[in-house]
Image (cartoon, rainbow, N blue to C red):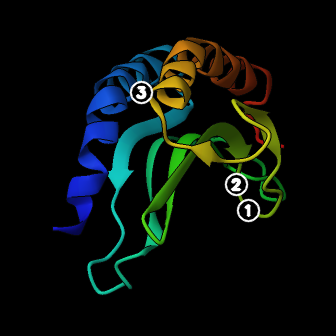
């Protein structure tokens, strides 16, 4: 199955992301937060696609003219079986403003890049929480 190539990466991070999403829901009553993994559809060409894991935060009290979505995302891109990865925090549509990222651009999936993301995740979660606290009505 196509998602098998992404499962080892998912297993490294998803439990942590789920725990942090639960904590965010407990600490911020104006945020609806969930963590999930999104696998590419099986009907896509086998050598092209992406996989992501997300802490997705919806700001319940966002102003009408502001974005109401902030996410911490780990994205893995698959192009001809060359996997690249990055992790970032980004506001959603219409702004798509990146607030923080581990790498300037996606890098090859290696032990080193996975270790770096794992090491940086607590900092990204802290930044996510700071942004939620400072922008309860969106940006």
Q: Residue at x 47, y 43 (%)?
A: 54
Q: Nearer the viewer, residue 36 or 7?
A: 7
How far from the left and from the top, in percent, is residue 81?
A: 42, 65
Q: Residues within 10 Å of mark 1 (few under 14, many from 20)?
A: few
Disc 2: which residue: 92
Q: Nearer the viewer, residue 20 or 47?
A: 47
Task: Report the Cα–Cα distance between label 1 and label 3.
Answer: 21 Å
99 with respect to 88 (left or right): right
How far from the left and from the top, in percent, is residue 70?
A: 65, 42
| Label ID, residue 68 | none
Judge whether 21 appears above or below 85 on screen: above
Q: Residue at x 73, y 62 (%)?
A: 93
How far from the left and from the top, in percent, is residue 133?
A: 71, 19
| Label ID, residue 93 | 1
**On-image quarter of the C terminus:** top right
Q: Nearer the viewer, residue 84 or 54?
A: 84
In the structure shown, which secondary structural element does the residue marked by tag 3 occupy?
helix
Would residue 4 be seen by someone viewing this image from the given angle?
yes
Work out whether mark 1 precedes mark 3 in sequence or the reverse, and give the earlier one: 3
Disc 3: which residue: 21
129 with respect to 80 (left or right): right
Location of residue 47 by image quarter: bottom left
In the structure shown, which secondary structural element does the residue marked by tag 2 occupy?
loop
Q: Residue at x 40, y 28 (%)?
A: 17
Q: Residues within 10 Å of mark 3 (few under 14, many from 20)?
A: many
Q: Are marks 2 and 1 in contact (CB under 8 Å)?
A: yes
Judge whether 48 appears above or below 7 on screen: below
């Amino acid at each position: 199955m196509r998602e098998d190539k992404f499962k080892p990466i998912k297993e490294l991070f998803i439990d942590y992301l789920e725990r942090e999403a639960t904590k965010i829901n407990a600490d911020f009553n104006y945020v609806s937060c969930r963590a999930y993994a999104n696998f590419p559809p099986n009907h896509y060409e086998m050598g092209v696609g992406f996989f992501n894991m997300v802490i997705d935060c919806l700001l319940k009290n966002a102003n009408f003219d502001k974005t109401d979505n902030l996410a911490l995302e780990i994205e893995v891109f698959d192009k001809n079986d060359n996997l690249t990865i990055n992790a970032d925090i980004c506001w959603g549509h219409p702004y798509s403003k990146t607030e923080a990222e581990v790498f300037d651009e996606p890098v090859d999936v290696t032990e080193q890049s996975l270790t770096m993301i794992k090491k940086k995740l607590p900092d990204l979660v802290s930044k996510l929480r700071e942004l939620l606290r400072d922008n309860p009505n969106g940006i």
